[in-house]
Amino acid sequence: MPRTDPHPTPDPDDPGPEAPGAEAGEPHADCVECGRPTAYPASRPGIVRCPVCEWQEAQRSACSG
């Protein structure tokens, strides 16, 4: 089975979703798992993940127990 990249190359023409709580021009926080930019501002406290890593973490924790 061929593997696919979980982090597809973003389309440079797609502005993407607006960051929750991020103001225009404020730098984005890097994902703690893969280092890619997240939708959160760098000033956000706690663990921040990109959408792909957030989804993968939700999958891992959903079946534990």
Image: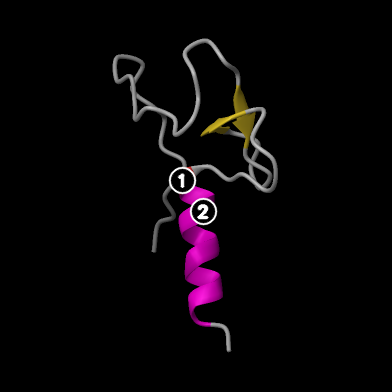
Tell me how far mark 1 sits from mark 2, CA to CA: 5 Å
| Residue found 63% across the figure and 30% down from its top | 29
In front: 50, or 6?
50
The disc label shown at residue 51, or none: 1
Span colored in magenta: 52-63
Q: Are marks 1 and 2 in contact (CB under 8 Å)?
A: yes
Which residue corresponds to mark 2? 54
Q: Position of residue 46 (x, y in %)?
A: 70, 46
Q: Quadrant of residue 36?
A: top right
Q: In the image, 50: left or right of 17?
A: right
Indicate how the structure is coloured in the image.
secondary structure
Label 2 neighbour load within 10 Å: few <14, some 14-19, many 20+? some
User: Up-down: is 31 above or below 58?
Assistant: above
What amino acid type should be assigned to the residue bearing mark 2? Answer: Glu
Q: Position of residue 24 (x, y in %)?
A: 47, 13
| Residue ranking furthest to the left | 13
| Residue found 44% across the figure and 55% down from its top | 3
What amino acid type should be assigned to the residue bearing mark 1? Answer: Pro
Q: Quadrant of residue 57?
A: bottom right
Q: In the image, 28: left or right of 23?
A: right
Asked which secondary structure carries label 2, the reply is helix
Q: Is residue 62 magenta?
A: yes
Q: Position of residue 59 (x, y in %)?
A: 47, 69
